[in-house]
Amino acid sequence: MSLGERMAAAHVVYKGPSVLKEILIGIGLGLVAGGFWKMHHWNNQKRTKEFYDLLDKGEISVVREDE
C-alpha cells in the first residue's frame, strides 16, 4: 500500500449535518425545556394559592403591626 492509498483510507469524509437528526434533537430539547418551565410555573401557582388561602383564613397579614 502506497502512502497516498494509506492517507486516502485514513481520511474520514464529513457528510454534513443530518437534517432529520437535528430536527429530532431540537424537538427533544424543546420538550425538556418546556417541561421544566411548566414545573416552575406550577410551583409559582401553588405558592401564590397557598399565600392567598392563608390570607383569607386570617393566619397571615400583609399589614405591618405597630409596636
Image (cartoon, rainbow, N blue to C red):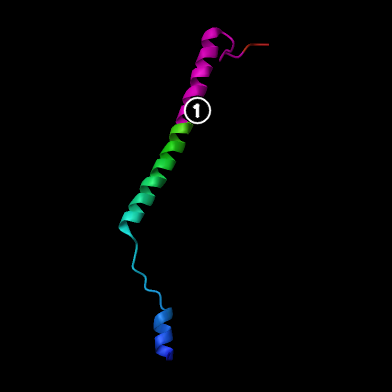
Residue at the left extreme, as displayed: 19
Instruction: Name the residue at the top extreme.
Output: 57
- Left or right: 66, with 55 as reference point: right
Residue at (43%, 37%) from the top-left corner?
A: 35
Which image quarter holds the C terminus?
top right
| Magenta-colored segment: predominant secondary structure | helix
> How many marks overall?
1
The image quadrant of residue 57 is: top right
For label 1, the residue is 43
- In reply to whether residue 50 is colored magenta, the answer given is yes
Residue 36 located left or right of residue 18: right
**In what element is the residue under mark 1?**
helix
Query: Which residue extends farthest right?
Result: 67
Q: Is residue 29 above or below residue 21?
A: above
Which stretch did the figure color magenta?
Answer: 41-64
Q: Position of residue 65 (x, y in %)?
A: 63, 11
The one of 45 and 10 positioned closer to us in this rendering: 10
Say if 14 sits above or below 21 in the image. Answer: below
The image quarter containing residue 1 is bottom left
In percent of the image, x 49 and y 23: which residue is there? 46
Q: Is residue 49 above or below residue 36?
A: above
Q: Position of residue 55 (x, y in %)?
A: 53, 12
Question: Closest to the observer: 12 or 54?
Answer: 12
Residue beneath the point at 34% across and 62% down: 17
| Mark 1 surroundings within 10 Å by alpha-carbon count, few (fewer than 14), some (14 through 19), many (20 or more) | few
Q: Could you tell me residue 22's position as x and y percent?
A: 35, 55
Report the front residue among 51 and 40. 40
